[in-house]
């Protein structure tokens, strides 16, 4: 059994999607970051960085409970555990890793800043908006080129797509028109049709 500590943000939704795709039973612990639950001693013991998502696998390596934080690491952990969404053939495996790290190091941090400066910042900061929106569009361009050459980020649906989808799903928050990125739109519409994704994206918690 997996204990999932998460909330309905883009990073949090990666794990709802993954666990729904895997049909793995899990216990959901709501960590409301709007109420600072992420700073509680109980949660900090699981993720010393105080960010969602995190998991405890009660049946971890050696049959002992094992805690994992960082959404990319959790996706790799669950893919390795189940043998799903991370093909073992070396070239494909490293392709998935590259696109997963592209999400973790590029899309997540930059799109997160766009959401902050367009939607949450207490004051309008034109320099930050210009800087992050420009990089946001550049990253959409990278995705669009890749998806013009491949059906998914790495030919078959993988944890790289699962990590990227919930960030692209907020394109309206980023004031991006997906019509400008037709290959991303085709990929987005395909993944939006998956029942596990629909279930995960409909989850909202207070
Ligand atoms: N690199 C981390 C980022 C996690 C992250 O930024 N989570 C956000 C929600 S999407 C969070 O917990 N924010 C709470 C805070 O910053 O206090 C991961 O991918 O797991």
Image (cartoon, grey):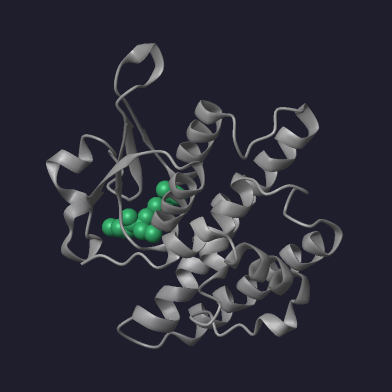
Ligand 1 shown in quarter = bottom left
Which residue: 70% across, 28% down? 88
Residue lying furthest top: 62
Which residue: 50% across, 27% down? 81
Residue lying furthest left: 41
Q: Which of 22 and 109 is in front in this view?
A: 22
41 up-or-down from 197: above or below: above
Across and down, in percent, residue 148 comes to 83, 65
Q: Nearer the viewer, residue 157 or 77?
A: 157
Which residue: 51% across, 81% down? 129
58 up-or-down from 30: above or below: above
Corner quadrant of residue 182: bottom right
Which residue: 62% across, 53% down? 161
Corner quadrant of residue 134: bottom right
Residue lying furthest right: 149
Across and down, in percent, residue 29 comes to 23, 48
Q: In this view, does 44 lie to the left or right of 24?
A: left
Q: Which of 167 and 190 is in front in this view?
A: 190
Q: Is residue 41 left or right of residue 91?
A: left
Instruction: Name the image quarter holding the N terminus.
Output: top left
């Amino acid at each position: 059994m997996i204990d999932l500590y998460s909330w309905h943000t883009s990073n949090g939704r990666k794990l709802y999607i993954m666990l729904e795709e895997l049909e793995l039973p899990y216990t959901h612990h709501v960590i409301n970051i709007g109420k600072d639950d992420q700073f509680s001693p109980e949660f900090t013991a699981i993720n010393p960085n105080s960010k969602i998502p995190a998991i405890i696998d009660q049946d971890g390596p050696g049959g002992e409970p094992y805690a994992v934080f960082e959404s990319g690491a959790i996706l790799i952990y669950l893919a390795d555990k189940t043998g799903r969404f991370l093909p073992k053939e070396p070239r494909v495996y490293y392709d998935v890793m590259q696109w997963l790290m592209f999400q973790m190091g590029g899309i997540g941090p930059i799109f997160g800043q766009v959401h902050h400066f367009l939607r949450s910042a207490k004051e309008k900061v034109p320099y930050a908006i210009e800087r992050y929106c420009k990089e946001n569009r550049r990253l959409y361009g990278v995705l669009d080129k890749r998806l013009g050459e491949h059906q998914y980020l790495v030919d078959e649906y993988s944890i790289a797509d699962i990590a990227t989808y919930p960030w692209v799903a907020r394109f309206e928050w980023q004031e991006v028109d997906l019509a400008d990125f037709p290959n991303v739109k085709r990929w987005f519409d395909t993944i939006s049709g998956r029942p596990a994704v629909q279930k995960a994206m409909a989850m909202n918690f207070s």
